[in-house]
Image (cartoon, helix red, strand yellow):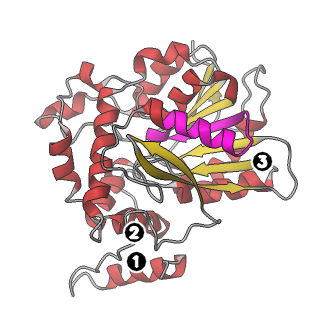
Amino acid sequence: MPLTSRKIAGLSLALALGVAAGPTPTPDFGPQLERFDYPWPVQTMSVDVVGASAQMAFMDIAPDRPNGRSIVLLHGKTFCGATWESQARALSAAGYRVLVPDQVGFCKSSKPHAAQYSFEMLATLTHRLMESRGITHASVVGHSIGGMIAMRFAIMFPDAVDRLVLVNPLGLKDRSEEGLPYSDVDALWSAEKRTNYASIKAYEQANYYHGTWKPAFDRWVWMEAGMYAGPGRDAVALAQAKTSEMIKTQPVAHELYRIRPATTVVVGTLDATAYGRAQIPGSLGRFLTAIPQAAPVAVRQMPNATLVRMEGLGHAPQVEAPERFNAVLLDILHAPVAGTTRTRAAVDRPEPIG
């Protein structure tokens, strides 16, 4: 039976009240979240990956009063398309058609055992999905690893991008240059197999939410943990290991000058995320540059980019403060592409980088 928001709230309450009695069992949602509800109907596009048939899941949300524009929302590594629910509702209400894929290897999409993941492959599949839905161009919004996919997409298909919005994107630094050693897929796979609710929450609380926690965050932790809870956990862990290796070995940092579309980089100033910190020896992890420090340098390398800082928020501002983030996102999307920098408010304002 699919898990509803009410049932997730019950699980979170049970976890809070039952710590002394023992851990709360994580529901088995299936390796493709077969038993986890999404807010809109989920469709699939058939694709071939290394000679095997696979499915790319997505939601295509039509507005009641179309404004003629489309938005593609690309999720992060520990989130899914469903995590964009608040943004999709706000965008649809503003007249945008909203296309929300689950990338192959993630969430409700297939996780082919033989897949050799690349940002080029994921960007190509995203472009193919747009074409299959009759969307020739759109604003592309990517969070975290979705930001890396979005940057690669903009490099490969610049004419398909009206505007690029990167939310706390990974890939702004080449971690190898900062001393991050290589971890092979087997080592990463072994670590991923230990993933559970507690480990996901601990990581996100420390890195995404600057030590804080809200009950609303639990829904997405249960979602992610639920893919690891049943017999499909090895397939999920392998896909996550392969995409982790992809982040390390395929940085976009050296190609930022190739991103031609108008770009806005939105950064939560308290984001502590620095990919690879868990793999780097001991105290060397402190030398990895976190996203808020990497972003200004990266923005200067992009031909047409602006930085927006969201003060007091972390790695996932769209989850931490959805209404505040939605206002910023809509303001970015409504701005003329060739316009001058505008100030929204005392915080969350675009900054010229020069």
Label 3 vs 2, first from the N-terminus:
3
- Amino acid type, residue under disc 2 in the picture: Trp
Residue beneath the point at 45% across and 54% down: 79
Mark linked to residue 12 = 1
Residue beneath the point at 28% across and 85% down: 18
Q: Nearer the viewer, residue 67 or 335?
A: 67
Within 10 Å of disc 3 (Cα), the crowding (few <14, some 14-19, many 20+) is many
Residues drawn in magenta:
122-148
Is 272 positioned to the left or the right of 130 in the image? left
Tell me the SS state at disc 3: loop
Find the distance from the CA under tag 1 to the CA under tag 3: 33 Å
Residue beneath the point at 18% across and 38% down: 279
Tell me the SS state at disc 1: helix
Residue 38 can be seen, yes or no: yes
User: Mark 3 highlights which residue?
Assistant: 96
Task: Report the mark closest to the observer, 1 or 2.
Answer: 2
Is 120 drawn above or below residue 340 in the view shown?
below
Tell me residue 209's x, y (percent).
Answer: 41, 52
Mark linked to residue 222 = 2
Mark linked to residue 188 = none
Find the distance from the CA under tag 1 to the CA under tag 2: 9 Å
Residue 146 drawn in magenta? yes
Q: Nearer the viewer, residue 99 or 303?
A: 99
Tell me residue 172's x, y (percent).
Answer: 42, 26
Within 10 Å of disc 1 (Cα), the crowding (few <14, some 14-19, many 20+) is some
Is 28 positioned to the left or the right of 142 in the image? left
